[in-house]
Image (cartoon, rainbow, N blue to C red):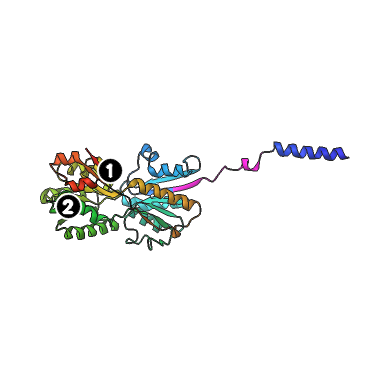
Amino acid sequence: MWYSTVGGIVMLILSLLTAPHAADAQPRGKVHRLGYLRLGPAPSEAEWQQSPFLQELRQLGYVEGQNLVIEQRYAAGKREQLPILAAELVRLNLDLILVTGNQAAQVLKQATSSIPLVAMGAGDLVGTGLVASLAHPGGNLTGMSGLAVDVSGKRMELLKEAIPTLSRVAVLWNAGDPAMTRGFTEIEVAARALGLTVQPLGVHEVHDFDRAFAAITEARPDALFMIADDFTIQHRTRVLDFAKHRLPTMFPIREFVDDGGLLSYGPSTLHIQRRAAAYVDRILKGAKPSALPVEQTMKFELVINLKTAQTLGVTIAPVVLFQADEVIK
């Protein structure tokens, strides 16, 4: 009798050893499903894979194709597509949606009040009503503010310091974006304090750029100052092709200067994207967007293209050259 009991125990042990473990029968970990909405065009696959945002996510343990899926939607500059794309993302029942730019953020806020939203660079989130306050955003949106409004005055000061003879400045911005219009208002105030005259060039549609270029040609201002968002960035080649051999330019992001613009001063996109990844990580681990303060980037960079200065016959004041984070020669 005893040996039958022992035999039963042996058989039980063998069955436990040979049976598949429950842990092995389950997925090794949750697959997180994110969305991404942007007004601008889609990046190339290489640009996406090399983006600081995706690189930072990998450092935090999230890898596309393993434990991460990102549904990307790009409106290619067509604002009317944003509500359609936002609705597509909301229907996918994602864990979180990342968004770039105020217009896309506004559309997503209207489309969902339950899915967490993380802004990867936007203008005045408080002034445009996207969050209640920086410290207590409330609702389902938090993330990074690019301080598009707050640094406009500093950007104009740098342009004036770089070119002391400056007196008339053309300002190009997306007049269809409330945050960018607030930026223009800030620029007007700063220009007035510096004794400068502003030529306003608000654009709504693609054909407005030709009208703006014609107005610049007629008025002959001393410089072009551009407020960048997804809409104007999409047409940066057109702006640069027109301006870089005609008049000095000031932009908020360095990519314009890399492509031939004269000056840029603005938040580091590298820093913004990496911090946005940190927000994603915290929310996926259980944090509520309403409890995560909006972060205003404190890292700015001044980039100067001396090759463009030579082409234009412009001498950049030494005091500005000394402040530059990078000089392209």
Identity, as a three-letter code, of the amino acid under mark 1: Glu
Identity, as a three-letter code, of the amino acid under mark 2: Lys
User: Which dot marks residue 255?
Assistant: 1
Region of the chain picked out in magenta, as a range: 20-34
* Residue drawn at point x = 41 percent, y = 57 percent: 141
Judge whether 118 appears above or below 306 on screen: below
Mark 1 vs mark 2, foreground winner is 2
Where residue 139 sits in the image (x, y, percent)?
Answer: 43, 61
Can you see residue 207? no
Quadrant of image for the N terminus: top right
User: Which dot marks residue 160?
Assistant: 2
Whether 25 is among the magenta residues is yes
Closer to the chain start, of discs 1 and 2, is 2
> Is 287 positioned to the left or the right of 74 in the image?
right
Report, in whole angstroms, how far the alpha carbon at label 1 lies from the one at label 2.
21 Å
* Residue drawn at point x = 47 percent, y = 53 percent: 283
Can you see residue 264? yes
| Count of marks placed on residues | 2
In terms of depth relative to the viewer, which is nearer, 97 or 257?
A: 257
* Residue drawn at point x = 31 percent, y = 51 percent: 79
